[in-house]
């Protein structure tokens, strides 16, 4: 369990109902996880990607944004238009389509979070993380006083904050801030899921730990455990009383196609091996093996002129892609 998060097991459906109503009334943000991981690491910091250095993750992140925009600019819907010019909005959108990012998904709806906690891994307990978002809006501003370099004029004033542009994509290790934000209304998945996000400037940061540091009162955050045996009852109630299902939360052709895939037995994924090429001496080394498809090749150099790593992808392993 992450530092200083109190935990409660939801022993019954009536107990779950009471908690969900209370969370909705308090306007706390919620996040459902299908297993008891005990941490909140975003996808770009999990599994094989976890040990990848910041320099390389910046390359992958930038390449994913640019590759997305190169195609999406021809057909993006009005609700997605901001992603073509704003990098954070772009990775918000990419997160909805399972691209590894430094963002974590949250929602204002405890029922939506409960769906994601209960919708898979029926043999394992799920967990529902939640924190006081209105309190974050107050205490979060203190970060800019601590790190005035995140403000446009160096004053630390909240109304001068520009931390994403100034520090989030810097090659050097940035200040250790965390933000919580919402995507502007208009994107259909966002609307359906009442989504929000947390984002850190640094990679490899457990959002549970960082939120606990920012919100020191244990009563301002909590983890609710959804027992495996309660998952089917919760899913049935969400469908019948709240109209929440996979189809309602992913209201587009891509979501419908992903749901249709569940008809078929799982297949072995196609694997890709990433090989890093030092732009200074050409030396090559393996990064990791991943089921994620490549986003192309890009190079990046540090501020001092030293070499960084350029990703070169090749297919390896068996299975269908």
Image (cartoon, helix red, strand yellow):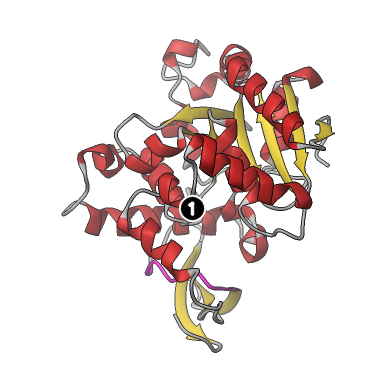
Residue 226 vertical placement versus 71 (above, below): above
Choose top left, top right, bottom left or bottom right for residue 273: bottom right
Left/right placement of residue 228 relative to residue 61 reads right
Left/right placement of residue 101 relative to residue 73 reads right
Label 1 sits on residue = 58
Give the quadrant of the N terminus: top right
Please give the name of the residue rendered at 43% of the width and 14% of the height, measured from the top-left corner.
160
Residue 109 pos. (x, y %)? 54, 30
Left/right placement of residue 208 relative to residue 112 reads right
Residue 24 vertical placement versus 310 (above, below): above
- Residue 301 seen anywhere in this rendered image of the structure: no
Left/right placement of residue 312 relative to residue 47 reads left
Residue 87 vertical placement versus 308 (above, below): above
Name the foreground residue: 56 vs 96: 96
Residue 251 vertical placement versus 183 (above, below): below
- The secondary structure making up most of the magenta span is loop
Q: Secondary structure at mark 1?
A: helix
Neighbour class for label 1 at 10 Å: few (<14), some, many (≥20)? some
Residue 256 pos. (x, y %)? 37, 59
Judged from this view, the residue extending furthest toward the bottom is 318
Choose top left, top right, bottom left or bottom right for residue 24: top right
- Residue 242 seen anywhere in this rendered image of the structure: yes
Magenta residues? Answer: 289-297
Name the foreground residue: 134 vs 299: 134
Residue 244 pos. (x, y %)? 49, 42
Q: Is residue 169 magenta?
A: no
Q: Is residue 293 magenta?
A: yes
Please give the name of the residue rendered at 58% of the width and 54% of the height, measured from the top-left corner.
43
Judged from this view, the residue extending furthest toward the left is 74
Residue 33 pos. (x, y %)? 66, 47
């Amino acid at each position: 369990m992450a530092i200083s998060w109190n935990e409660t097991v939801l022993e019954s459906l009536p107990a779950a109902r009471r908690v969900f109503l209370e969370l909705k009334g308090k306007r706390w943000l919620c996040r459902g996880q299908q297993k008891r991981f005990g941490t909140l690491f975003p996808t770009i910091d999990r599994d094989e990607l976890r040990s990848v250095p910041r320099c390389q993750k910046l390359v992958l992140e930038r390449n994913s944004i640019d590759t997305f925009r190169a195609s999406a600019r021809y057909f993006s819907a009005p609700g997605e238009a901001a992603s073509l010019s704003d990098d954070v909005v772009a990775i918000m959108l990419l997160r909805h389509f399972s691209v590894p990012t430094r963002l974590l998904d949250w929602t204002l709806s405890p029922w939506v979070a409960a769906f994601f906690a209960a919708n898979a891994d029926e043999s394992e307990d799920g967990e529902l993380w939640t924190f006081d978002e209105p309190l974050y809006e107050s205490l979060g501003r203190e970060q800019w006083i601590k790190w005035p370099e995140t403000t446009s004029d160096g004053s630390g004033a909240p109304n001068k904050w520009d931390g994403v542009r100034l520090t989030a994509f810097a090659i050097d290790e940035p200040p250790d801030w965390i933000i919580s934000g919402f995507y502007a209304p208009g994107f259909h998945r966002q609307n359906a899921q009442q989504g929000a996000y947390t984002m850190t400037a640094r990679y490899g940061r457990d959002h549970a730990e960082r939120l606990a540091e920012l919100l020191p009162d244990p009563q301002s955050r909590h983890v609710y455990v959804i027992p495996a045996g309660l998952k089917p009852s919760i899913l049935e109630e969400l469908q019948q009383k709240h109209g929440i299902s996979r189809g309602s939360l992913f209201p587009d052709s891509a979501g419908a196609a992903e749901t249709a895939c569940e008809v078929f037995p799982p297949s072995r994924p196609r694997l890709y091996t990433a090989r890093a090429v030092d732009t200074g001496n050409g030396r090559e080394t393996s990064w990791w093996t991943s089921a994620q498809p490549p986003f192309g090749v890009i190079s990046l150099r540090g501020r001092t002129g030293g070499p960084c790593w350029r990703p070169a992808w090749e297919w390896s392993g068996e299975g269908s892609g």
